[in-house]
Amino acid sequence: MSKKDKPKQPKVANKVYEAELFRLQTELVKLQEWVRESGARVVVVFEGRDAAGKGGTIKRITEYLSPRIARVAALPAPTDRERGQWYYQRYVAHLPAPGEIVLFDRSWYNRAGVEKVMGFCTPEEHSRFLRQTPIFEQMLIDDGILLRKYWFSVSDEEQLKRFRSRMNDPVRQWKLSPMDLESVYRWEDYSRAKDEMMVHTDTALSPWYVVESDVKKHARLNMISHLLSTIDYAEVPRPSVSLPKHPIESGNYHRPPRSLSKYVPDHVATLIRTDH
């Protein structure tokens, strides 16, 4: 059954979505503390077509996490120097140390997608990538890294709808690039490249998990819930903290006059005046 033939699932109510998202985010904090305490190394790879919802899901995952523990690796196009390196080298530099989580917003799989379709790599380089990647990922897993790979799947109609919504959105126009438009015109080429990638890299040791993402809120809940279910983490006891009822003052401190400090202008005051 194709996506077009699938019956539409009712959308989750906003109230239910917000409550479940917060519950999952609470679990992500527990996961973070377990990672810090245990010294685990977690790598989560986010791949999929442009506008498939990867970035929004990553934002919800990291919203309440410490940037010192959970960080996002979203690498720009390689430099001339990096193009001459071992292909995986610049990604290896971003792998986690003990007690860290790294979310790859696109990853070494660029070679299987945009580089393959747009001709940014040679057929030989692409073939080598498909052959070497399962070995590379096995090395990561053998070394103790917890690797999870998610492919966000979006229909061509929904992708085009999201592109159109970005065109006139002043805070999201930057997300629409000429390369994104190429993904529309080359939809079938990207589909073939993705299918070939899956054949070679969807292994028993390092499987791909497909996230249906035509409904962004569903995709976020499904992906985060699945990620949590694949890691055997435990809640780490927190040290008890007691706070005084009032700030403790010695009476020996005198604050300098306000006139000596440079305060930002009260922009909110102008909004309040306008509102009234």
Image (cartoon, rainbow, N blue to C red):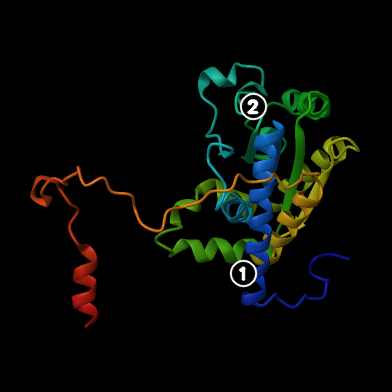
Does 220 sit above or below residue 49? below
Q: Secondary structure at mark 1?
A: helix
The one of 228 and 149 positioned closer to us in this rendering? 228
Identify the image quadrant of the C terminus.
Answer: bottom left
The one of 173 and 44 positioned closer to us in this rendering? 44
Rendered image quadrant of residue 2:
bottom right
Is residue 49 visible in the rendered image? The answer is no
What residue occupies the far right of the structure in this picture?
204
Rendered image quadrant of residue 16:
bottom right
Is residue 24 visible in the rendered image? The answer is yes
What residue occupies the far left of the structure in this picture?
259
Kind of residue at badge 1? Glu
Q: Any mark on residue 18, and which?
A: 1
Q: Position of residue 77 (x, y in %)?
A: 54, 32
Q: Any mark on residue 97, and which?
A: 2
Identify the image quadrant of the N terminus.
Answer: bottom right
Q: Secondary structure at mark 2?
A: loop
Kind of residue at badge 2? Ala
The residue positioned 69% from the left and 65% from the top of the image is 214
